[in-house]
Image (cartoon, rainbow, N blue to C red):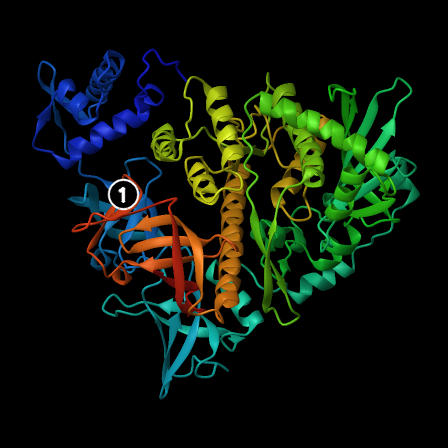
Amino acid sequence: MSKKKDKQSNPFDYNMKNLQYIILDIFRAHPAQSFNYKQFSKTLGAADTNSKRLIAEALETLAREGKIEEETRGKYTFIPQSSIITGTIDMTKSGSAYLLTGKPDGDIFIPQEKLNQALHGDTVEVTVWARHKKKPVGEVTKIVKRHKIDFAGIVNKKGNYAFLEVSESRMPYDIFIPEGMLGEAQHGQKAIARIMEWDSKSKNPSGKIIDVLGNPGENDTEMHAILAEFDLPYKFPEKLEELAKQIDAGITEEEIAKREDFRNVLTFTIDPHDAKDFDDALSYKILPNGNIEVGVHIADVTHYVQPGTAIDNEAVERGTSVYLVDRTVPMLPEHLSNFICSLRPNEEKLTYSAIFEMTENADIVNHRFAKTIINSARRFTYEEAQERIETGEGDLATEILHLDKLAKKLREKRFGKGAIAFDRVEVRFNIDPKGKPLSVYFKEMKDSNQLIEEFMLLANRYVAEYVGKQTKATPKTFVYRVHDEPDFQKLYDFSNFIKRFGYNIKFDSDKSVAKSINGLLSQVRGKAEQNVVEQLAVRSMAKAVYTTDNIGHYGLAFDFYTHFTSPIRRYPDMMVHRLLARYLAGGDSVSAEKFETKCKHASDMEQRAANAERASIKYKQVEFMADKLGSVYPAVITGVTEHGMYAEIIENKIEGMVPMRELSDDFYVFDEKNYCIIGRRKHKRYQMGDTIKIQIVRTDMQKRRLDFVIAD
């Protein structure tokens, strides 16, 4: 990132590529006009010399690349390009869609009548032929790959045939179920239908019922429907459960002889109170020289799950365990995840370990990786560990306090290098045995959580550094967890937005940006605008993904990072275990293309799992508020759209929408740039971050939606 030479803040100092995209978008909006750098400077509000120079350079670069043409000296015109573009369909609730191309200026608007049977998530080819609201407009000409063909919904029988009324908001078509394809489904039940064919002359696809979920409103039915919506499995094949039970969990003397023995070293786990799959443990030992040896011991899942087996193939497909409000849908059969591999107390377990010798200042003196055997002496919940940190009392309090001290020093060093502290509050529910939410509480990161986090980050970083640095001369394929730099145009817009709250972001360097964001996140903690600011900060950031192409992890400020510490619930960690073992033994590199495909699949499954978790939380939020119609609450505006504004109730962080039609005192218009809606006549403004009072007027369980009105 370049340093600023002018006092005036300017977004284009930091991302020349974004500036080129913005210039091209203006050309596309006015394809018949010609422009010079002065006109762009005026349009973009670039008043300083440096910014004008950058605009002139951007124009020259675009001309060299053949995207624009220099008509006369310093005057440029657009070169229209007719092309077929491949991308992913992003369906809107209205039925139209956008083609996501992965480029900042590349989203292409597709009207519903031009989708030609393409559905949300499909990979398609699109021909671009016009413009709409400054966006190129296209038509789907080929469906390359269907994203999904199974959909959940409610069966609506009509004589000998039926329709599955699909629950997903981004699936605008119901599925026709012809006679004989209903199976055991009854009218009004929730079921899953599979699209079998879709005649080009038919408005609706035809399909068959492949599973009956149950009656709407029942907890299992709704949770299974959410999993089906995101194309995630909601049950484990019985055959694989039986195969898991046949795995020999016995540990032979021959196997022990191959491993470093930690059974007599103090070892314990710290996990959530309701956890059953304990995949990491810490060992603690004071060395004769006064240094501390900390072992990060991870369940050796790949000892029991061999590549290419039925259990491994299922884990590849699932990619991750899925955590909904009331359940875990595991990646591995329960007998493996909760028993054989789980590091349960007072049981000998096989582990793969990263072992660190540390000074009192948390400097790493030595480290090694080894296959090990442990015997955990104690299973702590986070609450129990936190009590020892806060009071200094209880069994192993001295050891936990010492590890906490080291973890805090590791954390301090990490932030000193530019890491960003996204410790967001998570909404959780106390639910009864039938799944009904009884109360809402908030999960916050405390010292005990951060203790475990820091040592897991340490292990992940050193494993990635070993492969990334040690094999630099002859690079070897590896699975990295990367996080790209933020989109600085988005970050600049975000910076302008938070100024209205009195906050600011400094753009002098990468470290100053990270330091500013950390300061901001600390300042907003506990304030009404906290969630809005945190959400927008996250949106300005890139998403972390798995890849074989290491670009570092911006959010953690690590040059090398991977996931090594959770192989029970994440398949990338299993890949990392196998690759690390291979390279430690002097093995050759593996196919980058093959592993990159696996990485992309794992990233996709991770995103689906996160979406399903959010959907389950939203469902429980609506269910929790269903008996509170008419109640009035203080809320914060968390989002604005052309259809209305979203508001989050302050006391429980439950979000609903105030539809535009409910704002009857004026005609309101959406101001996208300033995150607000404004009344045309009275000029009343509703701004993101504003505190308002709302009244609950409607709840829709099937759509997972709450409707609010402004309360006088």
Q: Is residue 111 above or below residue 519?
A: below
Q: In this view, does 488 lie above or below 302?
A: above
Viewer-proximal residue among 212 and 393: 393
Which amino acid lies under the numbered mark 1 shown in the image of this protein?
Answer: Glu
Query: Looking at the figure, which quarter contains the N terminus?
Result: top left
Query: Looking at the figure, which quarter contains the C terminus?
Result: bottom left
Q: Is residue 657 above or below residue 216?
A: above
Residue 80, given in percent of the width and then of the height, sits at 14, 33
In the image, taking residue 118 as reference, residue 483 lies left or right, namely right
Point 47% across, 38% down: residue = 543
In the image, taking residue 671 as reference, residue 654 lies left or right, namely right
Viewer-proximal residue among 587 and 339: 339
Point 74% across, 55% down: residue = 276
Q: Mark 1 points at which residue?
A: 672
Tell me if I can see residue 370 in this picture. Answer: no
Secondary structure beneath dot 1 equals loop
